[in-house]
Structures are given as C-alpha cells and as structure tokens.
Amino acid sequence: MDITIHTTFLPHDDPDASLAFYRDTLGFEVRNDVGYGGMRWITVGPADQPGTSIVLEPPAADPGVTDDERRTIVEMMAKGSYARIILATADLDGTFARLQAGGAEVVQEPTEQPYGVRDCAFRDPAGNLVRINELR
C-alpha cells in the first residue's frame, strides 16, 4: 500500500495573521488563497514538498457544525486547545531562533523530551499548537 499525507486542515480566525505566520515566519509557500462567502481558505506548504499541504480554514465553515459547537470551537481556539500540528527540522535550534526572532509566541524552548524526541513549541495566531521535532 502506498499512502501519503496530502493535506491537513488547521483553523484560523484571522487569515492575514495566519498567512503572515505560515508564509513569512515559517517560510511556507502559498499554494492557494480562496475566498467565498466572506471566508478564506489558504493552502500553504513547504516548497520542497509539493505533495503535502496545510489548509488554513475558517472554523465555522462546515455547515454540519451547530451554533453551540461553533461557540465551543471558538472557546477552545482561544485557549489553544483545539488543534495542533507537529513539524520537523534537522536544525531545531536555528529554526527556534528564527521563529522567536520573527515574533512567534513561544510555548516551549528546545527541550529533550523523556519520550525520546527533542522539540520546541509555538502557537500560531489562531492559538494552534505548532510543535517542531528535531530530525535525528
């Protein structure tokens, strides 16, 4: 079986701030930027991995989500407990320094974890947890 990760979705509550974080701070390329009904979906990804994308989406866009669920999503995003993604780099210290210098909200400095990885963590403008593992 040949299966790859093609696309994942993360919510945003400010498309311009999210675009600045993923494009300007993380260095991802913008692959698509679509507006519809006053909402915006922005597709980004690493330039050297054209088959892997992140779609930054409005969290309330799903018509199957109730008003109560929308309120819960907004509350969880505000707490930073709604969504997360784990990225990886060979240069964790350099990446951490670049993101910190770019004004990203630091959650955890580079740390050797007891479960065998060295990583750091940030929050994107929507509150999503962005962990970055060191490739070894």
Image (cartoon, rainbow, N blue to C red):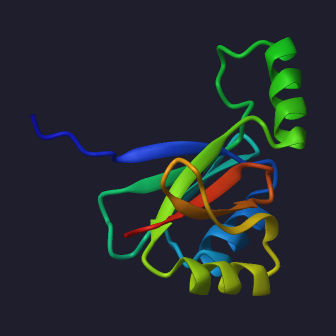
**Quadrant of the rendering where the C terminus is positioned:** bottom left
* Residue 75, image x, y percentages: 90, 31
| Residue sitting nearer the eye, 130 or 32 | 130
Residue in the picture at 81% in, 55% down: 14
Residue in the picture at 29% in, 58% down: 51
**Quadrant of the rendering where the N terminus is positioned:** top left
| Position of 109 relative to 102 (above/below) | above
Q: Is residue 44 among what the camera can see?
A: no
| Position of 31 relative to 11 (above/below) | below
* Residue 23, image x, y percentages: 61, 74
| Residue sitting nearer the eye, 14 or 113 | 113
| Residue sitting nearer the eye, 34 or 56 | 56
Residue in the picture at 86% in, 13% down: 68
Seen as rendered, the residue at the extreme front is 114
Q: Where, by quadrant of the figure, is residue 135 drawn?
A: bottom left
Q: Where, by quadrant of the figure, is residue 102 drawn?
A: bottom right
* Residue 8, image x, y percentages: 48, 44
